[in-house]
Amino acid sequence: MKSIREASSIRKDRGVKQVPTKKVHGQTDNMSVDDVLDTVSVEEPLEVRVGYAEKDSVQQIAVTMRTPGNDEDLAVGFLFTEGIISSKDDVANVTADMKCNGVTVQLHEHVELDPAVFSRHSFVASSCGVCGKKTIAAVRVKRQFTCPHDEPIVPAELIHKLPDMLRSQQDNFDHTGGIHASCLFGLDGYLVNIKEDVGRHNALDKLIGAELISGHLPLNDKILMLSGRASFELIQKAAHAGLAVVAAVGAPSSLAVQLADECDITLLGFVRDGRFNIYSGAHRIKVS
């Protein structure tokens, strides 16, 4: 697995670019226009390919729009949260071709792939058009890990600190103002890992992929902090990684709350400005 970790170096310079922009100031008679260079987040397609290390064949499995950087982590995390692989032992090698915006994940022969995966050429997110109890039941069956019911216990004071700690680590957000982050904290408030991407689901796949490659799953002794809202898809990915506590700066969706409750995940929303809401799993939060 050494080659995977070596290939997963952070390339933040590829995540932003400058574009010619006209900046408008003021209103009516006091209006002015300046020609400036503005920094924006890069968005490019990434083709995820899968093959077997023992065979000379590779096939496309998905295309996702992402911010370049940590592409190997993204590909591995995507395959894990989609239930295609179950551990880093399934992965023989990961190679990235930045000229073609592609990542190839070579699997060991014991991994069984559903032929339908290749006929679709892409995945439809579980939150798109497939909702309700049947979808939630499928997540519960497919996930690799379950959360200890009474652990971890997290003091509310630590939750209040998470937004500022997350914000202080969002390097690309400082430059662009338009990128999502998924951040992993220890129970002592120590920053474990952070990934940024224009797609909130990609940011979480990058994070989970990096932790899987490092052999750190399940993540039930960690806290996941999301820079935006908590959607069903993000809670689904968190459930696969064994996360017991998920905090979000924004609001959760109704299906995210339902899935978190079904999977015994503590879900916190509107974590900012010294307040937060507990939508499920209140028994893990120590408020006094």
Image (cartoon, rainbow, N blue to C red):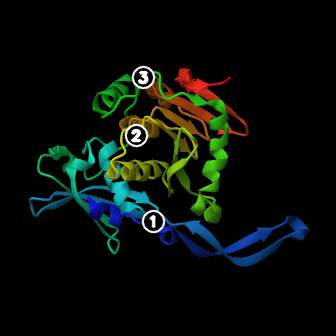
User: Is residue 52 toward the left or the right of residue 127 in the image?
Assistant: left
Quadrant of the frame with the C terminus:
top right
Query: Mark 2 belongs to which amino acid?
Result: Lys
**Residue 72 falls in image quadrant:** bottom left
Q: Element at badge 1?
A: loop
Residue that appears at 9% across and 59% down: 54
Residue receiving disc 2: 237
Q: Which residue is mark 1?
A: 10
Mark pair 3, 2: CA separation: 14 Å
Judge whether 134 appears above or below 129 on screen: above
- In primary-sequence order, the first of circles 3 and 1 is 1
Which callout, 2 or 1, points at the residue further toward the start of the chain? Answer: 1
Categorize mark 1 by other alpha carbons within 10 Å: few (<14), some (14-19), many (20+): few
Q: Residue at x 58, y 39 (%)?
A: 248
Name the residue carrying label 3.
262
Q: Which-is-in-front pick, marks 2 and 1?
A: 1
Residue 161: percent from left, percent from top? 66, 42
Q: Quadrant of residue 68?
A: bottom left
Q: Secondary structure at mark 2?
A: helix
Q: Nearer the viewer, residue 173 or 32?
A: 173
Q: Secondary structure at mark 3?
A: helix
Q: Position of residue 15 (x, y in %)?
A: 50, 67
Establish if 148 lies above or below 223: above
Q: CA distance from mark 3 to mark 1?
A: 35 Å
Residue 84 lies left or right of residue 246; in this view the side is: left
Tell me the quarter of the image containing the N terminus: bottom left
Sort mark 2 into few (<14), some (14-19) or many (20+) by Cα contacts within 10 Å.
many
Position of residue 2 measured from the top left corner of the image (x, y, whole percent): 28, 62
Badge 3 or badge 2: first in the primary sequence: 2
Q: Amino acid at mark 1?
A: Ile
